[in-house]
Each structure stands twice: as structure tokens, then as C-alpha cells.
Amino acid sequence: MSENSNNKTSPKEPQNGLLHYLLGHGLIDQVELDECIQAQQALADQGEQASISGMLVTHGYLTRKQVDRITSLLEADKPLRQIPGFQMLEKIGAGAMATVYKAKQISLDRIVAVKIMPKHLSKDKEFVERFYREGRAAAQLNHNNIVQAIDVGEAAGYHYFVMEYVEGESIHEQMARGHKFTEKEALDIIIQVARALAHAHERGFIHRDVKPKNIMLAVDGAVKLADLGLAREIADLRAAASEAGRAYGTPYYIAPEQIRGERDLDARIDIYSLGATAYHMVTGRVPFEGPNPSAIMHKHLKQELIPPDHVNTKLSAGTAEVIEMMMAKNRDDRYKSAKDMLVDLECITKGESPLLARERLDAKLLTDLAEESSVSGQRVSIEGPIPTGDAVKPKPKPKPSPIQKPAVTPTPIAPILIWALVISIIINVILAIGYIFGSK
Ligand SMILES: Nc1ncnc2c1ncn2[C@@H]1O[C@H](COP(=O)(O)OP(=O)(O)OP(=O)(O)O)[C@@H](O)[C@H]1O
Ligand SMILES: [Mg+2]
């Protein structure tokens, strides 16, 4: 499964709701689609008509049942074309959950983006409540690095979210086009997102879905975090783990406690997701790959992260340490706030060691040494500060092998024997002289 599978239809094929859905949800990929388009063309050359969905079934990429089910789902969720007060201009894109339009807000004569949620979500009362609560609260946030939420509303049974329109593209789109971020570029973007998060977190917001698709790069160079305040479906994760989960995107950036469905989630889930995003940007790889969402989620929970500087050996130790700390599996080992994370990110950009990540590494080193001393039964004295040179990461000392025994110092026997011999010779000489003179 690849994050970079793009969701654009072939240029030869007109945009089509069904194909867009199939590609966007990973039910088919572009190669399979192209193969069917070619086959369709070949039939057309022989004067035969065939639909693409028919070709996908004939080639075994979908079943007829799947096509029928998705077609009726799309029918029921036909996007809303008119919202009072807005003039819909064009469709900008569609994610796993919603469709986004460029629109003109007539009252203020300004261009906005309108995200229209699928109709079936209206049936979920809890979702609708959260959608309004979070959307309205987010409209109170105001930060240069946050896509401004403007309004939430409902028209003809559809719920919509109005936001600032960003002219530009997402980091995901840039990476899918093959753009590779330098360490400096990546840090610059991550810092701006961290500032957006610090602002939101301090005001009680958690994003819950920080990922490259939600980080937009505006043509004027601004970095904008999108979808803040957009309530997500509560069943997201349950669905993501199941087959139907293909509809919810792939969990490449999700925090372990979010996967476990813990109830007391806090801002540290966003720190983890931003760490995973940074990992992808500086290494060109997502932190954990897998054939399906459950396999990827399992790795977030259990598999040790390959340090990013092992994947991209040109990466500085400082950046690697910060990303590793952001992505600690146990949230107590992560930065406790976006503000703390910013301290370290700013240290790195100044060419200094990341203060807090180093403190944590040093503390770990001390713990390891203490453990080592309790294993060997010796006191450990630490002379002077632990070196924290920038280029080299302090590595914990290797533990002594348990079969090693303390060496026994040999007793110095030879000098004692020599001295005993000398003394006995002197005594014998004295006795001999005494005997000779005594007998005279
Ligand atoms: N405020 C905005 N201004 C301009 N374009 C936007 C805006 N918000 C979203 N878009 C565009 O609309 C597309 C769909 O966005 P959406 O948030 O629905 O899905 P996503 O974040 O790409 O993916 P997913 O549904 O997996 O979260 C995005 O790819 C983006 O290019
Ligand atoms: Mg989005």
C-alpha cells in the first residue's frame, strides 16, 4: 500500500464520480484503471462499446456487486450544488469523506472553500452535534498558519463547512509529484505547523488528523494547517481497521493511543502525527508501511521505528532525535506540548543541539548506567558532564556480558620469597660468625 498512490483519473478519462471514488478509496489503482481504459479503447477500435466499470469487472479488479453498491451510495450522496448565500464556482477536490468546492460568499464578495459532508453523516446525531460545536469554536481561532474556519451550516440535508480558500497545494500533492523536501525546507514547514498546533492546543483544540494532506502550501509561501475544527466521524477508527476502512484513508500518521481508542486523548496525538509527517518529508518514506490499514496500525503500536537518520543518512542527528521524540510510542516520552517541541525545532534551525531531546537522551543514558551498575553491583561515578556534541548521538554504553566475572588480582609471591631468602642468608652468616668466634 503506498501513500503516494494518486487519486487523479487518467487524462484520457473524463472525471467520473465512480472512478474518483474507486481511486480515492484505494479500491483500484491507476495502473489497473489505465489497463482497463486501454482495453476499452481497443474494443472501441473494433466498434464495440464497453463501460469502464464493466471493464474493471471483466478484468477481475471489482465484482459487479461492488460496482452496484458504490454506484447507489454515490447516487444517495450526490453532492449539493447550491447553498444559499454562496455561488459554487468549481470542485477543488474530494477526500475520503467529503467534497470541497471553491465558492463565492456573496455577502462579503470573497472567495472561500466549502466542504460538503456526505448525506449519510446527517443521520449520526452525535457527529452532527460535534460538527457544529467544533466548527463554530474553530471559527474563533485566528492564526496565520491555520486555514481559517468561517462557518458551518446545513442545506437540503447536507452539512457544510466554510473555510478560507487556499490557493496552492498540499504537502501530499507535492510529494506525490515526486518533490523531495530538503531538511531545511521540511523543518521550516514543520515549525509553522507546530506554531499552528501550539495556538490551537492552548485554546483547547486537538486536530486529530495531522497529515501531509492537511498541510497546505499557499502560493505566497504560507504554510496552512487545514481541517482544524472539522469533526471527524467517531467510527473512523473502527471503520479504518475493517475492510470498509479503505474508505477512511490509510493510517500512516496516527498515534498509538488513538489506534487503541483511548478516551483521554490529548494534544500529544498531534505531536506524534506531525512527527510521522516530518519523518515522511525528510526520509521520503512513511514511518510504517503495510499491506492494509490494520497491518500499519499494528506497527505503530508495536514495531520499533527505524531512526530517520538511518533511512536518510544525510539527516542531522538533531533533527532525527526530535522526530524520534515526537514519535515516541509512549506519549509520556514525547514532548509534553507543541511549545516544548518548538523549543527544540528552533534550536536545530539555529544549528544547536535540541535541548529537550538531549535532556531525555541523557536521562535515558543515566537510567541505563544505573541499571548497569545494579546488575554489576558496583557504584558508578559520573565524572564531568556527558558529552553532547552535535554530530554524534550519545549512545548508551554496552552492558557487560553477564558471564564476565571480576578479575582477581594475583598476590605478589616472588618478591616475598626473594626477601625471605636474603634474610635467612644474613641470619645464617651472623650465626656462623658467632659460632666461629665463640669456639675460639
Ligand atoms: N481550504 C482549502 N482551500 C483550497 N483547497 C482545499 C481546501 N481544503 C481542502 N482543499 C482541497 O480539497 C481536497 C480535499 O480535501 P479533504 O480535506 O476533503 O480531503 P484530504 O484532506 O485531501 O484527504 P482525507 O479525506 O483523506 O482527509 C484537498 O486535496 C485539497 O487540495
Ligand atoms: Mg483535509
Image (spheres, rainbow, N blue to C red):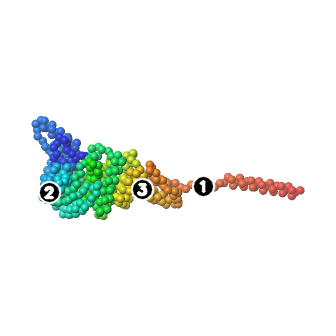
Location of residue 354 in the rendering, given as x and y in whole percent from the top left corner:
41, 54
| Earlier sequence position, callout 1 versus callout 3 | 3
What residue sits 30% from the left and 64% below the top?
A: 264
Amino acid, disc 2: Gly
User: What residue is shown with label 3?
Assistant: 355
Location of residue 254 in the rendering, given as x and y in whole percent from the top left corner:
30, 55
User: What residue is shown with label 1?
Assistant: 409
Viewer-side label of 2, 3 = 2
Tell me where residue 357 sits by quadrant: bottom left
Residue 35 in the image: above or below residue 92 = above
So how many labels did they put on this image?
A: 3
| Earlier sequence position, callout 2 versus callout 1 | 2
Q: Which mark is residue 221?
A: none
What residue sits 49% from the left and 60% below the top?
A: 374
Asked which secondary structure carries label 1, the reply is loop
Location of residue 417 in the rendering, given as x and y in whole percent from the top left corner:
70, 54
| Earlier sequence position, callout 2 versus callout 3 | 2
Q: Residues within 10 Å of mark 2 (few under 14, many from 20)?
A: few
Q: Which mark is residue 85?
A: 2
Residue 408 in the image: above or below residue 49 = below
Image quadrant in which the C terminus is located: bottom right
Asked which secondary structure carries label 3, the reply is helix
Viewer-side label of 2, 1 = 2
Q: Nearer the viewer, residue 74 or 281?
A: 281
Location of residue 1 in the rendering, given as x and y in whole percent from the top left corner:
27, 48
Q: Is residue 269 left or right of residue 114?
A: right
Amino acid, disc 1: Thr
Tell me, yes or no, if residue 31 can be seen here.
Answer: yes
